[in-house]
Amino acid sequence: MRLVQGCYTVPHAIFSPSSSDRWFNCPASAYLNYSAEYTVNIAAATGTLIHEMCEMLLKGRLKDISLEEYWLGKVVDIEDFQIEVTEDMVRCAETYVEYIFKRKEELNATMVIEEKVYMDEISDKCFGTADCILIAKDRICVIDLKSGKWPVEAVKNKQLKIYAIGAFLRYGDQDADITIEMTIVQPRLKNAIKTHEISSPNLMHWADTDLKQATDACDEENPQRAAGDHCRFCAAKADCDEYKSKLGDKYG
């Protein structure tokens, strides 16, 4: 086994796209989680490693060697974990990359990888990193890799919508009506590819209404607390009376 100093995760924005389902439902959780001690579990660290593997392929950093030959069996040091690259992880990365290259060719699109996108028109505290953006003549595609086995849908996906807003603000014609294509690639599931489309005017209407209302609610002097399934990964739930009274210790 070969030990490699690998990639490291970093703290997110206050209004992080990846946790948007939580702060949409519980405005108080945005700042509470931002100020909480930042921790990463092994599933998240594994996901970070798979993203790094994908980036190497997409950016052409592997020349005369396959992903499997380069990565399989390596042990990568990420955060407090040492993760060995398995065949399943290699296949996961390959499935994602194959889809991106196929879609890029179909659309004759420009590809942008691991791009930080900003929603400054809504809030300067809302930004994130989109896994992949494809820019075509009349279409922008936002593609997000999910390496876990918990099913994630593309429809009504707030995280994808926020990435799409940032991609459109950066690469789209603000006066044009184009198609925004949002795709989840989840290779470990049988139904690995899920796509949802929305027009750019409808997407920006959602930004100006739902997203703006949600960020404004978080910015209130005493933002509301609300318990629910969104509490599962909340770093503040141990000290939250609302969570304890409604859900007890459901999520530990």
Image (cartoon, rainbow, N blue to C red):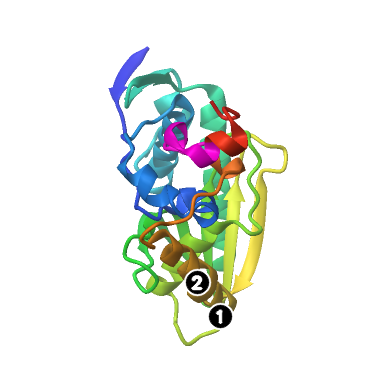
Which residue appears at 35% of the width and 53% of the height?
14
Residue 201: mark in rendering: 1
Which residue appears at 51% of the width and 60% of the height?
142
Counting every numbered tag in the picture gives 2
Which residues, given as a range, are shown in magenta? 233-243
Residue 160: mark in rendering: none
Name which of mark 2 and mark 1 comes first in the sequence: 1
At numbered mark 2, what does the secondary structure look like: helix, strand or loop?
Answer: helix
For disc 2, the marked residue is 207
Compared with 230, 198 (above or below) is below
Please name whichever residue, 197 or 248, is drawn nearer the observer in this view of the structure.
248
**Quarter of the rendering containing residue 88:** top right
Residue 147 visible in the picture: no
Query: Residue 97, position in %: x, y?
Result: 52, 45
Which residue appears at 62% of the width and 33% of the height?
149
State the separation of the CA atoms marked 2 and 1: 10 Å
Query: Residue 173, position in %: x, y?
Result: 44, 82
Instruction: Tell me, yes or no, whether the highlighted magenta stretch contains residue 234.
Output: yes
Q: Tell me if 95 is positioned left or right of 58 in this view.
A: right
Query: Residue 75, position in %: x, y?
Result: 37, 19
